[in-house]
Amino acid sequence: EDKVVQSPLSLVVHEGDTVTLNCSYEVTNFRSLLWYKQEKKAPTFLFMLTSSGIEKKSGRLSSILDKKELFSILNITATQTGDSAVYLCAVLYYGNNRLAFGKGNQVVVIP
Amino acid sequence: GAGVSQSPSNKVTEKGKDVELRCDPISGHTALYWYRQSLGQGLEFLIYFQGNSAPDKSGLPSDRFSAERTGGSVSTLTIQRTQQEDSAVYLCASSLARGGGADGYTFGSGTRLTVV
């Protein structure tokens, strides 16, 4: 059975801390891995990773994929209260173009 | 429109009633997905439409669930004889290209369905 597993499921940090979120996967027909941020209802797109070892960066957020060890990391540096959200990892399959999601990493940033 | 639009944003229905949820994707997006998110769970795939191809219905949990997409644009998800376990947020997403392209998928704000 294909799996997308995120850890930790939840964490609380103080403003200014660095957060590292993990997503491991065991899937067939892997195409890409995507990260989303979900604050209320609509997940918003952060990154799509297809190649190993190439870091994608957007402001204080960065992400990297390891296709040999089958995991991805999402880093958030100098966290702010606005970073409080659930971060969703999803794997895109070849063929049916379906996204398989993990349960998410709930991040709470306190002042 | 500028984004993916879903309606209603909230729906409370009595057990046994039918409900229809609507998704209006971004204009020109050929791919459309329905997902369901139950409390504390990840997003669960329901159905996928790609252009004029036959939809991938393999994620629909029972024959009480159906969906259609008219004219390659608006989609309606119908749940017949609703049960309490159908309570969830139903999210729709669309994308321009097969596989999401460089920007992934754009999600709507969802419909929160509560079956009482």
Image (cartoon, grey):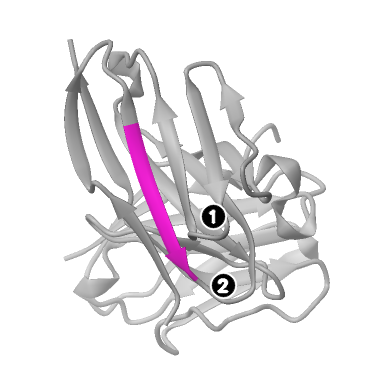
- Quadrant in the picture for the C terminus of chain A: top left
> Which chain's residue wears label 2?
B
Q: Residue at x 41, y 47 (%)?
A: A88
Residue B50 in the image, given as x and y percentages of width and height = 75, 67
Outermost residue, front side:
A68
**Residue situated in front as seen by the camera: A4 or B116:** A4
Tell me the residue that label 2 is attached to.
B47
Residue type marked 1: Cys
Residue pictured at 68% horizontal, 78% vertical: B55
In-image side of B26 versus A60 (left or right): right
User: Which residue does the numbered mark 1 point to in the structure image?
Assistant: B92
Of the residues under marks 2 and 1, which one precedes in the sequence?
2
Above or below, A30 against B5 in this view is: below
Which span of residues is magenta-colored? A20-26
Dominant SS in magenta:
strand
Q: CA distance from mark 2 to mark 1?
A: 10 Å
Which chain letter matches label 1? B
Specify whether residue B9 is in view: no
| Picture coordinates of residue A71, whole percent (x, y) | 46, 54
